[in-house]
Amino acid sequence: MKQLIAPCGIDCVECEAYKATKADDWGELACIEESWSEDEGKKYEPKDMLCDGCFGPRINGFCVTCDVRKCALDRGFRICSNCTEYTCPSLEKLWRSFSDHEIDDLKERLLMAKLNL
């Protein structure tokens, strides 16, 4: 499957919420909701986990409120590496919050996406 790179460098295609949405797997969406609600201290519902990627019609609960995504959209960028302020404090803070992503991998993905635009 083709990559779908988020502004921060995550490949949406690899995201568990994206996969469960595409599979129409409500049981998995419920598991994700429970896990993410616990991890983030917020209360989500399974429907909040529906996600077609950062630029799709349905965006999961976390990504709806993502400051990095909002900034990229406001500036007209699909990926942060196209911005003259890359890497900014907001992006660095977001990366530090990820427990399941290597920052170097995200940076490399953003560089490759920039080169392929």
Image (cartoon, helix red, strand yellow):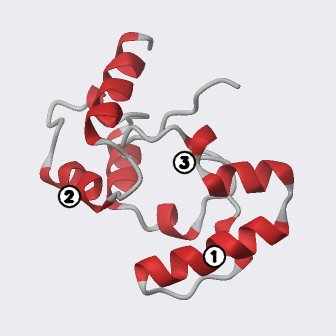
Which picture quadrant has residue 98? bottom left
Q: Which label's residue is closer to the chain start, 2 or 3?
A: 3
Q: Of the residues under marks 1 and 2, which one precedes in the sequence? A: 1
Give the left or right position of residue 91, taking residue 45 as reference. left
Residue highlighted by disc 2: 93
Closer to the camera, 113 or 16?
16
Residue 33: give its label. 1
| Among the 4 quarters of the image, the one containing residue 61 | bottom right
From the image, which quarter does the N terminus lie in?
top right
**Quick one: which residue is furthest to the top in this view?**
116
What amino acid type should be assigned to the residue bearing mark 3?
A: Cys
- Above or below: residue 61 compared with residue 104: below
Q: Earlier in the sequence, mark 1 or mark 3?
A: 1
Secondary structure under badge 1?
helix
Q: Residue at x 71, y 62 (%)?
A: 50
Residue at left offset 68%, top offset 82%: 45
Q: Are marks 1 and 2 in contact (CB under 8 Å)?
A: no
Which of the 4 image quadrants contains residue 77? Answer: top left
Q: What amino acid type should be assigned to the residue bearing mark 2?
A: Lys
The residue that mark 3 highlights is 54
The Cα–Cα distance between marks 1 and 3, rounded to whole angstroms, is 18 Å
Label 2 secondary element: helix
Whole-number angstrom distance, CA of label 1 to CA of label 2:
23 Å
